Amino acid sequence: MRSFTINYKSTKTEIVFGNYINVLKKTLKNKRFIIICDKNIFLLYPEIEKLSSVICINAGEKQKSLNTVEYLYSELIKLNADRTTNIVAIGGGITCDIAGYVASTFYRGLPFILIPTTLLAMTDAAIGGKNGVNYKNHKNIIGIISQPETIIIDKNFLETLPEEEYRNGIAEIIKHAIISGDDFFNKLKNNKSQKINDEILRLSIQTKVKFVTADEKEKGLRRILNFGHTFGHIIEISKNLKHGEAVGIGMVLASKISENLNKCNAATTDKTIKMLEYYNLPTTCKLDFKNFEKLLTYDKKNDNKYLHFVFIEKIGKVVVERISRKTIIRVLSKVIS
Ligand code: ADP
Ligand code: ZN
């Protein structure tokens, strides 16, 4: 069992790698815990039922709602959860986000443990303390930043993860490698198996940890993690693509925009494209400029005239700059025409 500690300003989280049942038993000892579990995971891993009381939820953006939060509160009351009960979330990003929110608000906050079961959640969603749900059409608009006591990374869950969900996670790992620099980037590039090994998983997690601990409330440095996401979110919604696929295309667009504004050279964009291709991720799709122009206005991270855009200068040097929406739209029209 290997582990390391994430030190936040006022709290800390232990990341432990290993068999989740062994780690859970060792971590919680005789403490009472209730499991909030993705229903698909519950069906695939019947041993979960033997661990403790389990409340199942469906993992979908539609279910990531206040209705599910209310359902979970009422189930917790039925199970006589009290201030000393620990919550254990087992599932992908959606389950971890909802369960983290419920745990952080029930009795004004119960201790919780996250056991992410998707590659995306292991390297990205479970780390950083963002918990919450959607409201009406607004993604993640209700939430809280609060850290789990422990995150357990058990790679065995990836054995049952569907291929498209696996690729979804790889896109964020590529993003972490681009942000991190040549060492990590080259390891990912030269990874013959195209499957994420322990070292790559650890490097990806450490990159995310580095940025979230430097900026817990997402005021500055953490914005670098949004590389590829300004356009990625628009593509995800308008093209109905998986988050990772859309972010991959978003990173290529962000790189081309950086190129156009003389911040990076074509070779940098090419490196990103080749990496995405190597991991069977799309690098482009048919984009409707008018739609982009309209939707760019509604990105919640923008004020009206300006937005914080994440540019790339080279592998390992990604920078955030405030730039006028007009300029981005002008350059984008060149890039996607
Ligand atoms: P994320 O937000 O991390 O991308 P989600 O919570 O949206 O993941 O889950 C994506 C889908 O994958 C859901 O249908 C979920 O039930 C399923 N899933 C999650 N983990 C696994 C796993 N280890 N094996 C099989 N299916 C899984
Ligand atoms: Zn993302």
Image (tube, rainbow, N blue to C red):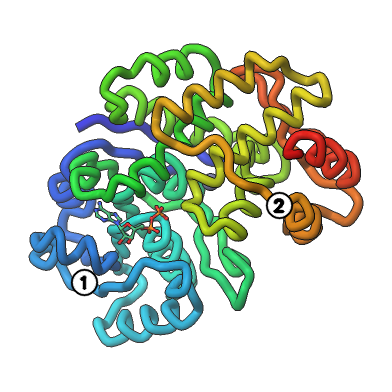
Q: Residue at x 29, y 18 (%)?
A: 192
Q: Residue at x 17, y 46 (%)?
A: 26
Q: Amino acid at mark 1?
A: Val
Q: Position of residue 71 (x, y in %)?
A: 38, 83
Q: Residues within 10 Å of mark 1 (few under 14, many from 20)?
A: many
Which label was assigned to residue 213?
none
* Position of 42 relative to 176 (above/below): below
Q: Position of residue 177 (x, y in %)?
A: 50, 25
In the rendered image, which quarter is residue 270 located in?
A: top right
Q: Residue at x 21, y 66 (%)?
A: 32
Secondary structure found at label 1 = strand
Q: Which residue is mark 1?
A: 54
Q: Quadrant of the C terminus?
A: top right
In the rendered image, which quarter is residue 238 located in?
A: bottom right
Q: Is mark 2 within 8 Å of ligand 2?
A: no
* Position of 314 relative to 20 (above/below): above
Q: Amino acid at mark 2?
A: Asp
Q: Residue at x 76, y 61 (%)?
A: 298
Q: Position of residue 267 (x, y in %)?
A: 63, 14
Q: Which residue is mark 2?
A: 288
